[in-house]
Image (cartoon, grey):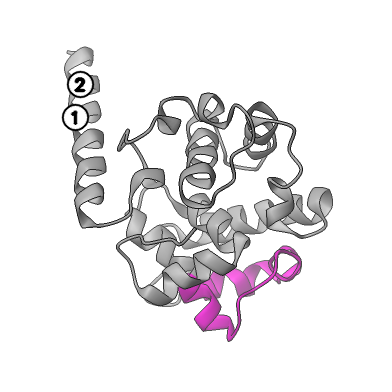
Amino acid sequence: MTFSLPIDAEANALLDRDPLAVVIGLTLDQQITMEKAFTSPWVLAQRLGHAPTATELATFDPDELIAVFAKPPALHRFPKAMAARVQEVCRVLVDQYGGDAAALWTGVADGADLYKRIFALPGFGKQKAQILVALLGKQYGVRPPGWREAAGGYGEQDSYRSVADIVDDESLARVRAYKKRVKAEAKAAKG
């Protein structure tokens, strides 16, 4: 499959060829726009002069990694915290998957197993884990039995709930409208 998020073509190309970029993109996808989150792995690669490996990021000097993340324009709104989070995720990938981000999803028994592996990553709660399961299924072709169920509502066909459904500006607008509606409903429920 080919990523066609509404971001730079080079950033999409990196997501296509580098599973770690996908994991980093979703790790960063909080409190910033989706476009920023999924462009940041490409910007990180530019700053380092190459696409980094999980092993490289896991062993990177923490202060130097923070400096790379914080260099204007920062890779995230919270460069210090997110540099540490990416490093934590990479350490898990090294310790449990030999540094191969794709090993997170290759060989899984089913969608529940995939969800369990993703949920175990630092900073991946239920929602983020379900979104990555859906993203892998819808955009990356990773579809073990039961993947849609493991992704919850994010796995539904044409649900337009998350980055998993974004392929162009129109789908981005639909996802944003969904999120705005959910936020308004939550606010109204609080009274």
Position of residue 33 measured from the top left corner of the image (x, y, whole percent): 32, 54
Magenta extent: 42-70
Label count reads 2
Residue 179 sits in which quadrant? top left
Residue extending furthest toward the bottom = 49
Position of residue 167 measured from the top left corner of the image (x, y, whole percent): 32, 54
Q: Is residue 42 visible?
A: yes
Graded by Cα atoms within 10 Å as few (under 14), some (14 to 19) or many (20 or more), the crowding at tag 2 reads: few
> Which residue: 69% across, 37% down?
117
Q: Which residue is mark 2?
A: 185
> Which residue: 61% across, 60% down?
19
**Element type where label 1 sits in the image:** helix
Which amino acid does the dot numbered 2 rest on?
A: Glu
Residue 71 sits in which quadrant? bottom left
3D distance between C-alphas at marks 1 and 2: 6 Å
> Which residue: 41% across, 58% down?
37
Q: Is residue 64 above or below residue 183?
A: below
Position of residue 185 measured from the top left corner of the image (x, y, whole percent): 20, 21
Q: Which residue is mark 1?
A: 181
Q: Are marks 1 and 2 in contact (CB under 8 Å)?
A: yes
Which amino acid does the dot numbered 1 rest on?
A: Arg
Position of residue 61 measured from the top left corner of the image (x, y, whole percent): 70, 71
Horizontal side of 63 relative to 56 (left or right) equals: left
Residue 184 sits in which quadrant? top left
**Element type where label 2 sits in the image:** helix
**Magenta-drawn stretch, dominant element (helix, strand or loop):** helix
Front-most of residues 39 and 187: 39
Front-most of residues 3 and 89: 3
Horizontal side of 1 relative to 94 (left or right) equals: left
Q: Is residue 90 above or below residue 50?
A: above
> Which residue: 80% across, 51% down?
97
